[in-house]
Amino acid sequence: KQWYQRRVRGVVSVRSRFKSEKFFCSSPSPFLANYNFIMGEWAHGLFSCFSDFGACFMVSFLPCIPFGKNMEAAGLTSCFVGGLILFVPLLDIICWFKLRGAIREQHGIEGSLFGDIFAILCCGWCAMIQETSQCKLSPQGGMARA
């Protein structure tokens, strides 16, 4: 039998002459060990704030809600606690650095802590919109459960 496989946005297609199956693959498995995966990129650029108008609106007027949802989607804490963290000075910045790093790790996005610090301190709202848009693309639809 000739088997081949293809990975497109987390869906692995496995085909042979007799059957075709699709299944979700959240991380590289031994089945895919011989394939090189390229590190991903953010789905939206840092300054493409208006590409997701709903996220732009929520971040502009009620930033605690998308921040809490992002914290929950990244698996760091619950949505309610994440929203409350945004109101605590210094803790919010530290958690925001951890959140951005967790989202990068979860989606296989190349980057560094220095890049996260630069994005958050220089253009925080754009960074939060970018994170919110990225979390919406997760397999759980932005609502990962621990």
Image (spheres, rainbow, N blue to C red):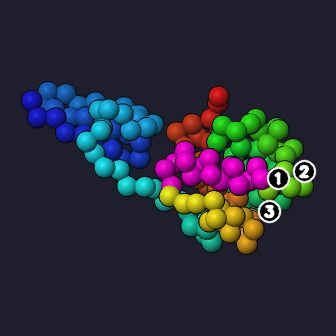
Which element carries disc 3, helix, strand or loop?
A: helix
The residue at which mark 1 appears reads as 92
Image-based side of 72 in relation to 32, left or right: right
Q: Is residue 126 visible?
A: no
Residue at 60%, 49% in the rendered image: 103
Is residue 76 visible to the viewer in this orientation of the structure? yes
- In the rendered image, residue 109, in percent from the top left (x then y), is placed at 51, 55
Q: Amino acid at mark 3?
A: Ser
Q: Is residue 50 above or below residue 28?
A: below
The x and y percentages for residue 48 are: 61, 69
Q: Nearer the viewer, mark 3 or mark 1?
A: 1
- Give residue 88's mark: 2
- In which quadrant is the N terminus drawn? top left
Q: Residue beneath label 3, please?
A: 60
Dot 1 surroundings within 10 Å: few (below 14), some, or many (20 or more)? some
Q: Nearer the viewer, residue 53 or 29?
A: 29
Give the amino acid at mark 1.
Asp
Helix, strand or loop for the magenta stretch, by majority: helix
Which quarter shows the C terminus?
A: top right
Secondary structure of the residue carrying numbered label 2: loop
**Contact (CB < 8 A) between labels 3 and 2?**
no
Q: Position of residue 24 (x, y in %)?
A: 41, 34
Vertical position of residue 60 compared to residue 79: above or below: below
Residue occupying image coordinates x 45% and y 37%? 26
Residue drawn at the location 84% of the way across and 46% of the way down? 85
The reply to whether dot 2 and dot 1 touch (C-beta < 8 Å) is yes
As drawn, the label of residue 113 is none
Magenta residues span 94-109
Pick whichever of labels 3 and 2 is earlier in the sequence.
3
